[in-house]
Amino acid sequence: MPQTEPPPLFSELEHLATEQRNPRSRNIDLAPVAEILEIIHTEDRKVPEAVRTEIPYIAEAVELIVDAFKQGGRLFYAGAGTSGRLGIVDASECPPTFGSDPEMVQGIIAGGPAAVFRSQEGAEDLESNGVDALVEAGVQPPDVVCGIAASRRTPFVVGAIRHARSIGCKTIYITCNPRQHFDLEVDVAICPVVGPEVIMGSTRMKSGTAQKLVLNMLTTASMIRLGKVYENMMVDLQMTNAKLVERSKRTVMTVTGVSYAKAAELLDRAGGHVKTALVMHLAGADAEEAAGRLEKAGGFVRAAIGKSR
């Protein structure tokens, strides 16, 4: 028998900001390629400003994350589809960029690893799947769980957040629907409203861009607050490939003014650790003393060399 009344999900989607039709792209299917790209670009330019308005809330989230890290906690992203993939990308980039433990920031996606490469859409439909994923990952306080869902409603993400709160974890939520419509209990909600997508409901576009910007800010600011950046340079990066080896040498040269050969020597004596090499040269210390200075300074190069500004 045919269904005559739409299900509750239909009505829910109908009213979401992320599911509205964009009047500015209504005739995009008739436009030449250059005009299609202009329409997309014009809409994309609205994203950074939408994120900027959320900076006070992003700052609150960073404070939660840094506090958790200092207690030995971890940051978990939970998402489905594009949102889940963005969380995994951000998590995977932290170790080579900041020298962080791979366990420190982790991405969880509905459908598991296979969903990174091929859509597993049905996996997001049950809150229990989000609960199970967090249990399997061993999430517990002082871990922080950050839900990522453009629509806010994704059951997998909602289930993960509710479970995290129930066991005492701090929670963050990133959504692209208005704050006044946000009705989920979390510690911090981040709500950059980017407006209707160029292609109705395709939240991999503006919403995905906004989410990526927020994730960049969360982990980068957190790592800066942990001393993993000196001035505006990565100084805890891992020398795991040829590019990072040369970047490490260039960083030492830029900060200290030494030659390429001297930078290579310092890094060799420092066991490949950029921060140790910097402190060795700037404080006139050997590797052991430099490491001790860094430990006493909580990993901050400025404090390790006695420089406050």
Image (cartoon, helix red, strand yellow):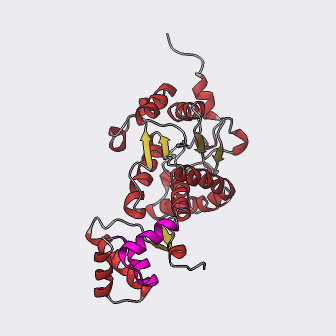
Q: Could you say which is closer to the camera, residue 39 or residue 68? A: 68
Question: For the view shown, which residue lies furthest in the top direction?
Answer: 1
Image quarter where the C terminus lies is bottom right
Q: Which residue does the image show at 48% across and 41% down from the upper left?
A: 79
The tally of labels here is 0
Q: Position of residue 249 (x, y in %)?
A: 34, 79
Q: Could you say which is closer to the camera, residue 163 or residue 261? A: 261
Indicate the quadrant where residue 290 lies: bottom left
Q: Position of residue 104 (x, y in %)?
A: 44, 50
Q: Position of residue 198 (x, y in %)?
A: 54, 51
Residue 296 on the magenta span:
yes
Q: Main secondary structure of the magenta part?
A: helix
Question: For the view shown, which residue lies furthest in the right direction?
Answer: 180
Q: Position of residue 188 (x, y in %)?
A: 65, 46
Q: Which residues are magenta?
A: 273-297
86 lies above or below 270: above
282 lies above or below 29: below
For residue 262, say whether it is visible: yes
Q: Which residue does the image show at 51% across and 78% down from the upper left?
A: 305
Q: Could you say which is closer to the camera, residue 173 or residue 209? A: 173
267 lies above or below 182: below
For residue 198, say whether it is visible: no
Q: Which residue does the image show at 64% across and 57% down from the upper left?
A: 59
Residue 262 on the magenta span:
no
Name the side, left or right, on which 143 lies relative to 256.
right
